[in-house]
Amino acid sequence: MTRQTLAAFVDRISFADRHSAGLTSFTPDRIKTELLSGLTVALALVPEAVAFSFVAGVHPLVGLYAAFMVGLITAVIGGRPGMISGATGALAVVMVSLVAAHGVQYLFATVILMGVFQVLAGVFRLGKFIRLVPHPVMLGFVNGLAIVIFTAQLTQFQITGPDGAKVWMTDWPLVTMLGLVALTMAIIWVMPKITAAIPAPLAGIAIVAALVIGFGIDVPRVGDLASIKGGLPLFHVPMVPVTLETLQIILPYALILAAIGLIESLLTLNLVGEVTRKRGGASQECIAQGLANTVTGFFGGMGGCAMIGQSMINVKSGGRTRLSGIAAALFLLGFILVGSSLIEQIPLAALVGVMFMVVVGTFAWQSLTILRRIPLTDALVMVLVTAVTVMSDLAIAVVVGVIVSALAYAWNNATRIRANTHVTAEGAKVYQIEGPLFFGSADGFAEIFHPEADPDEVVVDFMNSRVVDQSALQAVEAIAVKYEAVGKTLQLRHLSHDCHRLLNRAGQLIVDADDDPDYGLAVDYSIRTGMLNGGH
């Protein structure tokens, strides 16, 4: 196939992606950039996939096959061109107990069920709820993940001692390793100032590898982790009993893995979107991740999700379309099939240097300078999410951050409810309510009124308020009953039309106005002993 034919083929399959990325044509230079970005990512994927396989307690090829298949499928149909997916540590730490207790075949069955759940999440468009993640949680997420990526590289500074146990490097081996890491980082920093023809991370890996191999420098290499040589992944149905007991074993793991995988993938989707200036695609990404994991389970892979480190390497190297992700997956398969002997000679120091530069680029350094300028709650949420990500788990950290942010938001709005009062010429007292009325502010709303001391006619004006839920309607009903009990008239103004109907059914006097709001309030109601009962 000629270069012109290849360019025409890629132009046909990726028009939408080029258009959204601002690329008017797939030129030879663009193809070169995408392919080199994919090669760089593939090199960085190898030690990560092997390491996560060891964490999960499975053969390295199980992780490598997952990196290939999940990466390929999500690159083709995922929600964000340029994103890279593969085997990840966040999933591996959950898998280890399953593999230890029941074996790898149960892992494959779990990955298949995990993928089904993720596809359903995409079909029902649950990915849209990622927009509920506040910005402080996102900052905490990227900071925590940067720290996790950094600490994960420290294991490469360990060697096997005489007794077979892992010990930290000392003396010249440590100095040599640190020197090569620093050299790789320096090349990556300097290279863009010299030329953009070759991605800086790829240049760093190639130059340091050439030095190590050419001068025979004795440092740990990829082959010291494990052999990556293998054949094509083969289809097979997981060898587990098709029974209710099997479902009871794999179901909890599948749900947890599906949730963690989607949270990490969707947050990475947003992060890559900020770099590439693209939005949307959450539901499509859920379906892509689900299909990828389902297929991977049938081909002996450990499953996976989006990888923020490799995604950042890709976009920083110029990868902007699906071609870079596809190339990364195919290069990785090529390493497994025919290039293992060469890839196993690459020094780990070069790959550690690349990942350290990813850490530098991923950590939100500006978050350290704004901690004193943002609200205290936001600062605490940011630090909390970072700490939980490092000490526990990404999914738990995000859930904790969202819950704390939601509680803080509810509390702040609960304290905003207040009323301005005045007496009309006719002697009626008017309460002009300000602030949202919902479950958190219902008690504060009730404390505003003084039925015994108020005149015979009272008006409650909701022009500057918003009745949010059933608790709010119940609070309005309770105030109306109190005024009725002391023989006084209560008028309610500027409520939505559905609130009109509900409270009219309860026998309350509501004054219509042309500027009544028309927002909806979903309430199932029933009238019992003059009170409004319902559920929001």
Image: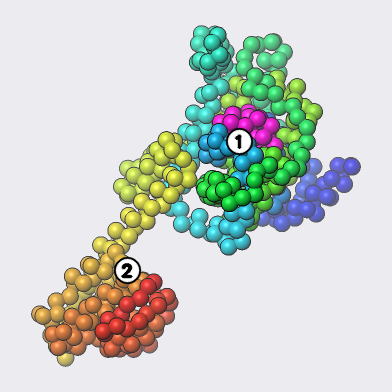
Q: Quadrant of the C terminus?
A: bottom left
| Residue 58 is covered by the magenta coloring | yes
Which circle marks residue 438 in the picture? 2
- Residue sitting at 27 percent across and 77 percent down? 476
Which residue sits furthest left? 453
Give the residues in magenta.
44-67
Question: Is 485 positioned to the left or the right of 21 in the image?
Answer: left
What is the number of callouts on the image?
Answer: 2
Please provide percent x and percent y for residue 437: 30, 70
- Residue sitting at 64 percent across and 11 percent down? 218
Camera-near label (1 vs 2) is 1
Q: Is residue 521 above or below residue 360?
A: below
Asked where in the image residue 450 lies, by quadrant, the reply is bottom left
Which residue sits furthest bottom? 426
Residue flagged by tag 1: what amino acid is it?
Gly
- Residue sitting at 58 percent across and 37 percent down? 102
Please provide percent x and percent y for residue 176: 57, 13
Which circle marks residue 103 in the picture? 1
| Circle 1 residues within 10 Å: few <14, some 14–19, many ≥20 | some
Q: Is residue 213 visible?
A: yes
